[in-house]
Image (cartoon, coloured by chain):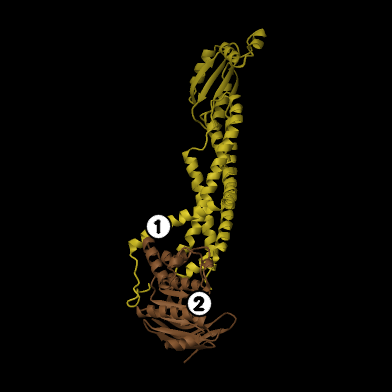
Chain colours: A brown, B yellow
Amino acid sequence: MIRFDQVSKRYEGGKDALSRVSFELADAEMAFLTGHSGAGKSTLMKLIIMMERPSQGQVFLQNQNLNRLARRHIPQIRRNVGVVFQNHQLLFDRTVFDNVALPLIVAGYQPREIGRRVRAALSKVGLSDKESRYPVALSGGEQQRVGIARAVVNKPPVLLADEPTGNLDPELSAEIMNLFQQFMQVGVTILIATHDLELVKKMGLRQLTLNHGQLSG
Amino acid sequence: MVKPATKGASTHALGLTDKVRSAGAHHRETCLKTLRDLLKNWMTSLMTWLVIGIALALPAILYLLLANASSFGGGFDGTARINLYLSRGPDPQLILQAVQAQPEIASADIIFASEALQSFEAETGFGNILLSLPRNPLPDVIEATPLDVAPAELTILSKRLEALDGVERVAIDLEWLERLFAILALGERFITTLGLFLSLGVVLAIGNTIRLAIENRRAEIEIIKLVGATDAFVRRPFLYLGFWYGFGGALVAWIMVQLSLLVLSGPIKQLLDSYQNQFSLEGLGFVTTFGLFTVGISLGVAGAAIAVSRHLHTIEPT
């Protein structure tokens, strides 16, 4: 589903964010991506949704070489990859419902279908009663869950999460992880970047560790 | 391009008809939402509409005045009239026959001195002055209409007519008409140039307004690009914004033109009445109104397209 082949990324200014990273995630596999701050976790995820392009090497998504994709195909890639961002990336002038609906509106779903799917996603993350609230009125954990709902609302085959439990207490973290496992069980490939080694250990899943841009372990 | 997932979470691929229908719905929705947003911040919007309106109204008014002047000039059907003032003595009828015999003359008629005196009296009321004179000072006149010929030929014709026995003077009232048309042509050129400059101004003004709108919605643009919005999708609201700025500007211009015509029509009527001209000021007809809105909307969309192409691709999620 996701394959990195000798991928290096050097930013302008000469900093090597990733060097010669190779790994593969199978369909319906769930793995953690760990490493110190600045180890290259975010860069790795950005390469998958084409926010960045590799300096060297190749990234494959659903057997497609992303290097060969023209700019105009980027939207299609992003529709197939749900992303939970560390900083939520919510629109604060729109309601929870409208935020979660964004990927569906962008992909051209019918309003009725949008309503149905958004409510399903919100009920999954336990925010059914908050759909007409604005993000400011929500706690950090709730905002994070809105982000998760938005990432899964169009049922993408791949889900990326950057520190999805960063703002949550252990109980909520466990709930979120439980949620991710449910997605995995229906066939979603999931990659979760996290600092929370405790959590990683508890889950007992595959772990990719980045150290100064290199994959170890 | 991207193959639908063969396995895993069920991704419901959208059919083509769905896509077309939803694109249509999104157009409609974006179009209306943009208008609603503009009306919500009506003070700011009105400023922009006024700027565009003034820039459109100025050439529109000048154009209308010019069109009116043209039709005023056109009332004289563009052909010259030749007046032959006759000396006393020879029989006017003989001269008339000689004039009618000229190949370039379409028709000719005599206005006898006595008739001329009557109509002068009737039209001006100064008849008493003439009556106080010992005799009618007006000559017999032959009024001739030439065929549609070039001004140079008319000059030759007039020389020939002047040489006729009993013709004292030949007057062609062509020159002022030629001057009028020359002035109109100049005015048209002037208005076209002015219009082009003002159009450029409108495009730039709208472009700048759209640039600010793009800047204001930077966060939103980044996020919708992240969740898979196409460039067309991102562009759409800004193009509609340009559309509405152009439309509103044209509406303001239309109102301004109508008001100006209302203000101008009185004095113009007075002026023309003094020339005893049967003339009414032509307003904005359907065609001109349609043209005004077409120009306004085109400039609006053009300005938006320029701003969008210059600024939108610089916004990428980071």
A144 or A188, which is in the foreground? A144
What x and y, as percent, mark residue A188?
Answer: 38, 78
Chain under label 2? A
Horizontal and vertical percent position of residue B199: 57, 50
* Tag shown at residue A52: 2
B185 vs B219: above or below: above
Q: Position of residue A95 (x, y in %)?
A: 48, 63
Kindly indicate whether the residues beneath marks 1 and 2 are on one polypeptide chain: no
Q: Amino acid at mark 1?
A: Ala
Rendered position, B135 above or below B295: above
Is disc 1 in contact with disc 2, using a CB cutoff of under 8 Å?
A: no
Q: Nearer the viewer, residue A148 or B159?
A: A148
Q: Is residue B162 visible?
A: yes
Residue B58 spot, x, y in % from top left: 59, 43
Please state, as top left, top right, bottom left or bottom right, where the N terminus of chain A lies in the image: bottom left
Q: CA distance from mark 1 to mark 2?
A: 32 Å
For residue B25, which numbered disc appears in the image? 1
Could you tell me which residue is drawn at 51 percent across and 44 percent down?
B292
Badge 1: chain ID: B
